[in-house]
Image: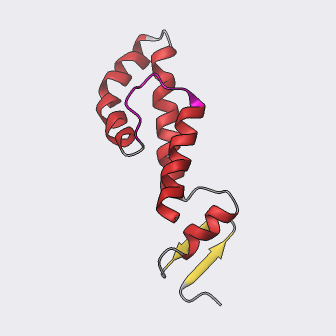
């Protein structure tokens, strides 16, 4: 039995260190923090492709947030592909686990 760990479907609470990180790695599932960062980066990277002026002005407001989150995953450009974002987030997670 794992001490201090509760696993409920995809939601998990960890009180004992890296136990759930290894579990998430073995089932190829990102932890919630990495998952949320990946979703933010994917959304923000799609904003420049729209011709809508409202979305472009929104991009100017959140561009600094994009670079702040992206720098943690070694991404330096807002015009990055979806596969590059996903692989960078997964690589950062696997570096943490191993």
Residue 10 visible? The answer is: no
Classify 50 as above or below 40.
Answer: above
Q: Residue at image x 67%, y 57%?
A: 28
The one nearer the camera, 46 or 71, is 71
Tell me residue 97's x, y (percent): 52, 64
Type of secondary structure dominating the magenta stretch? loop
Tell me residue 82's x, y (percent): 58, 30
Q: Is residue 81 magenta?
A: yes
Q: Is residue 91 magenta?
A: no
Task: Single out the residue that lies furthest toward the front.
Answer: 98
Tell me residue 98's x, y (percent): 52, 65
The span shown in magenta is 74-82
Q: Residue at image x 32%, y 22%?
A: 60
Residue 25 visible? The answer is: yes
Q: Residue at image x 48%, y 56%?
A: 33
Classify 54 as above or below 23.
Answer: above
Classify 41 as above or below 22.
Answer: above
Looking at the figure, which quarter contains the N terminus?
A: bottom right
Q: Residue at image x 61%, y 87%?
A: 2
């Amino acid at each position: 039995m794992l001490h201090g760990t509760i696993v409920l479907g995809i939601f998990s609470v960890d009180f004992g260190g890296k136990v759930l990180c290894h579990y998430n790695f073995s089932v190829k599932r990102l932890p919630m923090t990495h998952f949320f960062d990946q979703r933010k980066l994917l959304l923000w990277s799609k904003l420049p492709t729209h011709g809508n002026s409202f979305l472009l002005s929104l991009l100017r407001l959140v561009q600094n947030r994009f670079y702040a989150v992206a720098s943690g995953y070694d991404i330096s450009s807002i015009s990055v592909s979806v596969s590059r974002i996903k692989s960078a987030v997964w690589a950062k997670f696997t570096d943490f686990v191993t």
